Amino acid sequence: MAATLSDDLLIQQALAGRQSAYSMLVKRYEQYVFTLVLRMVKNREDAHEVAQDVFLKAFRYLKDFRGDSKFTTWLYKIVYTTAVNHLRKKTPEILSMDDGERPIHAAQEWSPDASSQMEIQDQNRALHHAIKQLNHDDATVITLFYLYEHNLDEICQIMDLSLSNAKTKLCRARQRLKNIVADQYQELMSI
Amino acid sequence: MNQPFLLTDDLLWDYIDGFLDAPEQLRVEAYLSEHPAWQAKLAAIKAEQQQLMAAPLEKPDTLFADKVLRAWASEQVGEHALQSAPAQRDWIIRAFAIVMGVLLTAPLLLFVMSAVKAKPSNLPPISIPSVDMGPMLDWISLPAVQLGMVSLLALGFLQLLDRYLHAKLLLRQQAG
């Protein structure tokens, strides 16, 4: 029953002081928030800390959410800024890494035509490790676009980018991911 | 003269990701229908896209949600304390200020009055009702009273320090 409650209703209830609404919001989005944070900060321990921080900030500023965008867009913007701030404090050099300047090798397609559950798991693991090697912006844009199915306009809002910039970032991120997979996980991915 | 249409990997990705407008889409589809090699590429890229979309979500520790909710609850308690504490502490500080004010100004006033009384003057004497201030001044100079005054000052200082540290802690929690 609880799963059918809309985000808007849960937000209203939370703002009215109902603790169970906060609980439902956390349970509904914990995996999405945690996955995105983990893909950015690359470390489970830090990801727990940042993800908790994200929820606390979201609850603190919930009254400011006006519904102009989707709740997830608003929430992922908090995820992005909180994780970037965390990275900035922890490893400033990560943020100075510019887009684009990693070598691009001849790309090969990988085929996910897996014939068993174990193969799919291996491929997911390989994909997870490949995404871990992307910089935080690449990992974010890939996750938001493909896994969370946010469109480019929403990604622009979350990451504070122009439309053309977001599209370029997505293309480059995809290319880099493909290169990592081709270089390191070719056996697992092309079956 | 029309340029010959040339399909690229990027354009194919844009096609799959839905970034192309209708005429561009039609051009890509026409090209694909004539080039089986690109059809195979399309299938591979679609599979790649599916894999990205179907990647499993990461699960945080089982107690993660509980920890978040506990932290939120304690933050709310802290905010409540911040809102209610000043009124309570202000009352203590006001009472302290009143007591201190009385204790400090009364002897001063009495001292000034006794000095005025003692000073010789050419002016005709004004009849001021005489008050015996000796016992009062003696009382102020008692060590126990002075100790009490110092204790009150210390208490007031500690109250202010406590209030400052408490507010600072809450602000840090909110900022963090």
Image: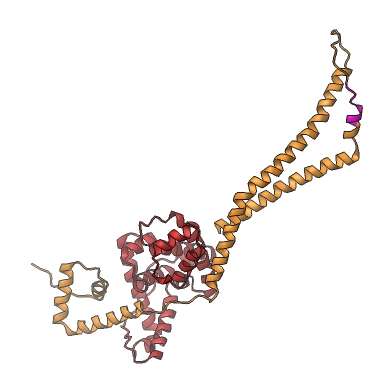
Chain colours: A red, B orange
Residue B7 falls left or right of residue B165: left
Between B106 and A157, the residue placed more toward the observer is: B106
Residue A174: percent from left, percent from top? 34, 74
Residue A144: percent from left, percent from top? 37, 69
Residue drawn at x 41%, y 79% as measured from the top left: B56
The answer to whether A184 is drawn above or below residue A23 in the figure is: below
Q: Please say whether residue B63 is visible from this viewpoint.
A: yes
Residue drawn at x 37%, y 57% as measured from the top left: A67
Q: Within the image, what quadrant is residue B24 found in?
A: bottom left
Residue drawn at x 52%, y 75% as measured from the top left: A44
Q: Please say whether residue A92 is visible from this viewpoint.
A: no
Between A163 and B92, the residue placed more toward the observer is: B92
Residue B139: percent from left, percent from top? 89, 34
The answer to whether A24 is drawn above or below residue A116 in the figure is: above
Residue drawn at x 86%, y 39% as measured from the top left: B146
The answer to whether A149 is drawn above or below residue A63 in the figure is: below
- Which portion, as a residue range, is magenta? B131-137
Residue B138: percent from left, percent from top? 91, 32
